[in-house]
Image: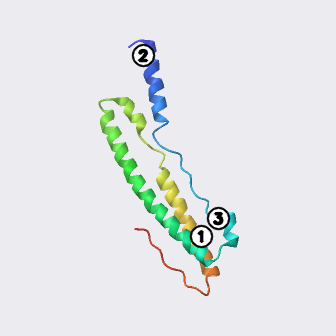
Amino acid sequence: MNKFSLIAVVALALSLSACAGRSPQPVAVVQQKDTTMDCTAIQAEIQQNTAQAAELGKDKGGKVAQNVAAAAAGVFFPPLWFLMDFQGSADTEQKALDSRNQYLSTKALAVCKEQPLKTVRAE
């Protein structure tokens, strides 16, 4: 393998590694809008966060399958190892959503004194 071919393979591998995963974008636990939220808005956001966490669980399963396939195929074509995703975006975002829901549940205890808070569980 000449020097140009080696440089081309390394450049290709580095460019492919950039496509392997996305950076995590966790939601902030405390947000500016929290001071104006009423009981209904808190319940709606908890339900929305729970649904989003369920979607992230599906994404996590897909990333695991992608990593397994890239690792197995990488035995025959090593540049595929650069396609593996080690960022754990789904885990980071799911933990942030759980923390946000815990905060909102605590806030709901104070705001929803007259209305009981509906219990929402992730499936």
For residue 15, side relative to residue 36 (left or right): left
Q: Can you say whether 53 is above or below 113 in the image?
A: above
Residue beneath the point at 39% across and 30% down: 79
User: Whole-percent x and y of residue 98?
Assistant: 52, 65
Label 1, residues with CA under 10 Å away: few <14, some 14-19, many ≥20: some
- Looking at the image, the residue that sits furthest to the top is 2
User: Whole-percent x and y of residue 43?
Assistant: 55, 74
User: Label 2, on which residue?
Assistant: 5
Q: Quadrant of the C terminus?
A: bottom left
Residue beneath the point at 57% across and 65% down: 100
Q: Amino acid at mark 3?
A: Val
**The quarter of the displayed image where residue 20 is located:** top left
Q: Can you say whether 106 is above or below 90 in the image?
A: below
Residue beneath the point at 39% across and 35% down: 81
Q: Are marks 3 and 1 in contact (CB under 8 Å)?
A: yes
Q: Amino acid at mark 1?
A: Tyr
SS type, badge 1: helix
Q: Can you say whether 86 is above or below 46 in the image?
A: above
For residue 5, side relative to residue 96 (left or right): left
The circle drawn on residue 30 is: 3
SS type, badge 2: helix
User: Whole-percent x and y of residue 63?
Assistant: 40, 48
Q: Amino acid at mark 2?
A: Ser
Reading the chain from its start, which is encountered first: label 3 or label 2?
A: 2
Reading the chain from its start, which is encountered first: label 3 or label 1?
A: 3
User: Label 1, on which residue?
Assistant: 103
Reading the chain from its start, which is encountered first: label 1 or label 2?
A: 2
